[in-house]
Image (spheres, grey):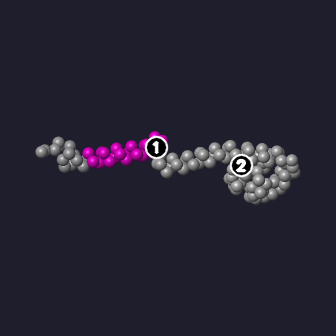
Amino acid sequence: MQFPSMLQGESLNRLIQGALFGFLATCVIGFNWGGWTLGSTAEKMADQASSAAVMKALVPICVAKFESATTAAATLVELKAIDSWKQDDFVEKGGWATFPGVEEPNRSVAGACAKALSAQK
C-alpha cells in the first residue's frame, strides 16, 4: 500500500508541524481570549463567588443586629475606639456575627461587619 505524498518524508514533517502549531495556537487563543478555564480555576472562581454572596447576605444582618441593641450608640463609640485589627474580635464577642444554627461566629462576616460599622458616622 502506498501512502499519499503528503504523508511521506518532508511533507509528513510539515504536516505534523502544522498540526502541532494549530493545536498550540488554538490552546493559546482559547485560554487567553476564548474564556476557557481549567476545572480547578472554575472551582476556585465558584468558591469566591459563593463566599462573596454569603458575605453580601450576612453582613447587613450583622449590622442590623448590632444597631438593634439597646446600647448601640455607646457600643459603636466603643468599637470605633478599638484598633481596626481588633474590631472583628469585638464583633465576634458581642455575638453579632453568630447566626442561628451555628455555634461559632463567622470571622469573615465579623471583619466585614466591623468595617461597615466603623464607616458609619
- What residue is pinned by disc 2? 100
Estimate how packed mark 1 is, as few (under 14), some (14 to 19) or many (20 or more) residues with alpha carbons within 10 Å.
Answer: some
Say left or right for 52 vs 82. left
64 or 20: nearer the eye? 64
Evaluate whether residue 73 shows in this view.
no
* Dot 1 or dot 2, earlier in sequence: 1
- What residue is pinned by disc 1? 36
Tag 1 and tag 2, C-beta contact below 8 Å: no
Residue 11 at what x, y percent from top left?
A: 22, 46
Q: Main secondary structure of the magenta part?
A: helix
78 or 95: nearer the eye? 95
Amino acid at dot 2 = Pro
Residue bounds of the magenta highlight: 15-36
Residue 14 at what x, y percent from top left?
A: 26, 47
Q: Is residue 18 magenta?
A: yes
Say left or right for 2 vs 93. left
Residue 40 at what x, y percent from top left?
A: 49, 51
Residue 39 at what x, y percent from top left?
A: 47, 48
Residue at image coords 12%, 45%: 1
Residue at image coords 75%, 55%: 92
Q: Residue furthest left?
A: 1
Q: Is residue 35 magenta?
A: yes
* Secondary structure beneath label 2: loop
